[in-house]
Image (cartoon, rainbow, N blue to C red):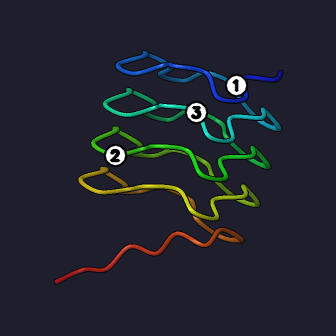
Amino acid sequence: MNLLQASLRNARFEDADLSGCNLSDADLSHGHFCHADLRGANLKGADLSHADLRGVDLRGACTDGAQITGTQLEGAALSGTSLEVVKE
């Protein structure tokens, strides 16, 4: 699926299969993606700020340049991505 530069602010994709989807440069801010499958998705330059990505499978996803300010990533599978969860 190609959603390049899509405006999906506040979208609801809980439990959705978005594996391999092209979401590069998309506005996904404030979106709800709990437990979604985003394995191998292209999220390069996507705006994920304030999105709910708890429990999301992001293994192998391209996340270069993705904006994650305020994003909830608890329990997300991040192996093979450039995202990093820092616990304080």
Judge by depth and name the residue closer to the eye, 13 or 65.
65
Q: Give the percent coordinates (x, y) of residue 73.
A: 37, 55
Q: Residue furthest bottom?
A: 88
Check the picture and name the quadrant holding the N terminus. Answer: top right
Q: Give the percent coordinates (x, y) of residue 67.
A: 43, 55
- In the displayed structure, does residue 28 sit left or right of residue 3? left
Residue at the spot 52% in from the left edge and 19% down from the top edge: 7
Cα–Cα gap, marks 3 and 2: 11 Å
Give above or below for 23 relative to 12.
below
What's under tag 2, amino acid-wise? Ser
Judge by depth and name the residue closer to the eye, 43 or 7.
7
Cα–Cα gap, marks 2 and 1: 21 Å
Give above or below for 42 relative to 68.
above
What's under tag 1, amino acid-wise? Asp
Q: Secondary structure at mark 1?
A: loop
Q: How many marks?
A: 3
- In the displayed structure, does residue 37 sit left or right of residue 54? right
Residue matched to label 2: 49
Residue matched to label 1: 17
Q: Give the percent coordinates (x, y) of residue 5.
A: 64, 29
Q: Quadrant of residue 88?
A: bottom left
Q: Reading the chain from its start, which is encountered first: label 1 or label 3?
A: 1
Q: Secondary structure at mark 3?
A: loop
Q: Residues within 10 Å of mark 3 (few under 14, many from 20)?
A: many
Q: Quadrant of residue 25?
A: top right
Residue at the spot 67% in from the left edge and 40% down from the top edge: 38
Q: Residues within 10 Å of mark 2 (few under 14, many from 20)?
A: some
Q: Residues within 10 Å of mark 1 (few under 14, many from 20)?
A: some
Nearer the viewer's eye, disc 1 or disc 3? 3
Judge by depth and name the residue closer to the eye, 64 or 12.
64
Q: Secondary structure at mark 2?
A: loop
Residue matched to label 3: 26
